[in-house]
Amino acid sequence: MDFQLLHQCLEAAQEAARRGAEVLESWRHRRQVRRKGRFDLVTDADLASQEAIREVLSKAFPEFAFLGEEGGARGQPGQPTWIVDPLDGTTNYVHEVPFYAVSVALAVDREVLVGVVLDPCRHEMFHAARGMGAWLGPERLQTTETAELGDALLSAGFPPDLQGREYLLDGWRKLAVKTRSLRRTGSTALNLAYVAAGRNDGFWNPQVYAWDCAAGAILVREAGGIVSHFDGTPYDLQREEIVSSNGPLHPALLAELNGTGKVP
């Protein structure tokens, strides 16, 4: 894609995220909650937000495919595809914890070209496009220069139901005694945006999906950071794990996490 088309896609993603966030806020006190899994929740707000986002994006680019957490078909090879999480941090949203986000990304052949993460509570819109940097409003984002785990603030995410998979917590146990502090805040998209913004030095999650990470991944990369899998290979949308960092911290972080996301 050329610069002009990328910019148009970024503008559409920002407008779609705004519309999705408006829907979330309008549903806050009248939502109905259902279970997708033992601890995995979905609300009417998720569904309404996704539909609002889809309407904006399909109007702007009717030829693009759409993949959303709450349903949507993956595009054909080479077809631009919107990848959307209409409410990342549903449990927080349900419990009135103000840490959730709308995530909108555009990918072609598994390469993310555009990403937007919008925090409705703080009115912060993180956005990036390939080769254009990562931004929070007019402020260009840059990851930290932290190189030692002892100086690092890290965040982590885990699947909703850990029963029988307690081994996924091994990375937390190892890093809890080697870092300045750890956080588990409940929104992968915002955690990645915070790495891009230099608020956190790194983030990992042993089980995620493309809609959780796509927008955040390009934010981190465009801010100068690294996004990979536990084995150090570059992040791929089709693999369900992620490690991100400012860059200098990445080798030490991978060394501690190596093998912690696997069945013993």
Image (spheres, helix red, strand yellow):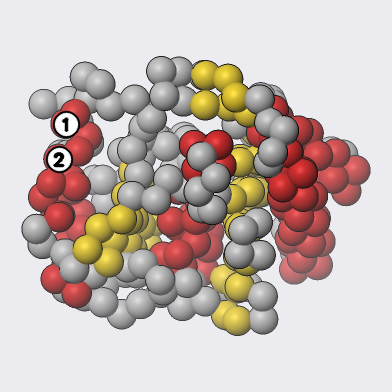
Find disc 2 in the rendering and name its residue: 170
Asked if residue 134 lies left or right of residue 20, the reply is left
How far separated are the C-alphas under marks 1 and 2? 5 Å
Question: Residue 56 at x, y = what percent?
Answer: 85, 45
Find disc 1 in the rendering and name its residue: 167
Residue at (10% x, 62% y) in the render: 178
Label 1 close to label 2 by CB (< 8 Å): yes
Asked if residue 138 lies left or right of residue 263, the reply is right
Between 207 and 3, the one lying in front of the other is 207
Residue at (11% x, 50% y) in the render: 174
Q: What residue type is labelled 1?
A: Tyr
Rendering quarter of residue 82 = top right
Question: Residue 125 at x, y = what percent?
Answer: 65, 64
Badge 1: few (under 14), some or many (20 or more) residues near its Cα, within 10 Å?
A: some
Residue at (76% x, 55% y) in the render: 18
Question: Residue 262 at x, y = what percent?
Answer: 20, 31
Does residue 102 appear in the picture of this structure?
yes
Q: Which amino acid does label 2 sit on?
A: Asp
Does residue 249 appear in the picture of this structure?
no
Asked if residue 262 lies left or right of residue 5, the reply is left
Secondary structure state at the residue bearing disc 2: helix
Quarter of the picture holding the N terminus: bottom right
Between 201 and 124, the one lying in front of the other is 124
Secondary structure state at the residue bearing disc 1: helix
Total numbered labels placed on residues in the image? 2
